[in-house]
Structure formats: structure tokens, C-alpha cells
Image (cartoon, rainbow, N blue to C red):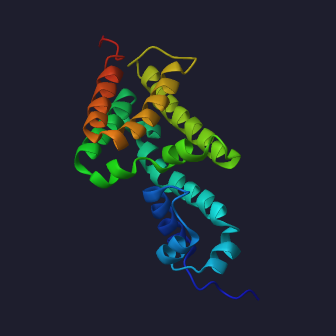
Amino acid sequence: MARPKGYDRDAVLTAARDLFWEQGYEAVSVADLEQRTGLNRSGIYQEFGSKHGLFAAALDCYADRVIAGLLAGLRDDHAGGLDAVVGLFERLAELFRCDEGVSTRGCMMVNATAELAAHDPAVRAQAAAYRDRLRASFGAALTRAARLGETKADPDHARARLLASALMGVWLTVRIDPADASALCQTIARQVESWRLPAG
């Protein structure tokens, strides 16, 4: 019978995720991870294989908890179509004005993409999955908008791809200038609103 683990894997992942989110991959040492997670080096390597393995698991944790929560409204049939997209960017605009922690850290997935994707195939694959998730989520909201008669149908999903790229760019912008990123989110929200067909 296997000996039960003496630690909470979810708590370790959350702690590691937050450390990598704050500092990036290269700046974090295994000693930093030991201190933040409470798990010693051998425990980290036994559970995750390596620092990189823990980082990959932390990125998955970020995607499953943070990104999923951010995008939930885009796939909610009760959230409307264009309203869901506009609402997402308006919430981010408010967040960037009011939450310095978010502005400082940005998006962990975008940060990892910028830091590592060019030379790390595993991170590049996770970044591609993130991009595809954004596109699919915006696509779901825009398809719903067309079904509700709010917009014309977009069979090529060009607008969904545009919004996914805009959101990733916003996450880089917020680390440079939170006020500018907030204003940019408001601009995107107004642009999306302009896609609405006249009532009638």
C-alpha cells in the first residue's frame, strides 16, 4: 500500500504558480520553490520530475483556474453575445485601474510565452493551446451574437482571432503602463460594440 503524501499537491501547485507568475521561470530557483511551497528538493523532483515539470504543471494550474474563470462568461449562453465580449474588456479595464498586483504580474501564460516559447517546445505548445482557447472562447460569444441577430455571421472567425491577439497584447501592455492598458481595453470594448447591427 502506497504511503500517503505528506503535502497538499494543489497547495504546492498554487504556491509555485504564484511564484513563477511573479518572477518568471528563469529567475526562480529550486531553493525559492522549496521556501514558497514547503516541499523540499527531493519532493519537487519526485512529484514533478524537475523545476521545468513543476513549471509546466503550474501553467496548467493557471489555465484551469485563472484563465478559465476569466473566459467563463464568453461561453455562457445567458451572458449574451457582444455583451459578454464587451464586459470582459470592461472588467479588465477596471482591474488594471484598481489592482496593482495584476498590473505588475500581467498574464502568466503571456509572460511564459514571451520568456520561453521561442526555445522551449513544451511552453510553445502550451502557448498555442492558450491562443486556441482564446480564439474558441471569443468565437463562441461571437457565434452567439450572430445567432441573436446582434452581428453578421463571421464564418472565418476573423474577429475572434483579432480579439485573441488583442487580449494577449493587452497583457503585455499592462506591464508597461497599466493606465494605457486600461484605456486600450475600453477602446476594444467600444470597437466590439460598434459591430452591433442596428435594432429592427
15 w.r.t. 185: above or below: below
* Residue positioned 45% across, 53% down in the render: 66
Is 134 displayed left or right of 92 in the figure? right
- Is 153 or 138 nearer to us in this picture? 138
Query: x%, y% of residue 76?
Result: 44, 40
75 w.r.t. 157: above or below: below
* Residue positioned 68% across, 67% down in the render: 50
- Is 7 or 137 nearer to us in this picture? 7
Quarter in which the N terminus is drawn = bottom right
Q: Quadrant of residue 8?
A: bottom right
Query: x%, y% of residue 140?
Result: 51, 31
* Residue positioned 66% across, 80% down in the render: 42
Quarter in which the C terminus is drawn = top left
Residue farthest to the left, as pictured = 98
Query: x%, y% of residue 158?
Result: 53, 19
Query: x%, y% of residue 44?
Result: 63, 74
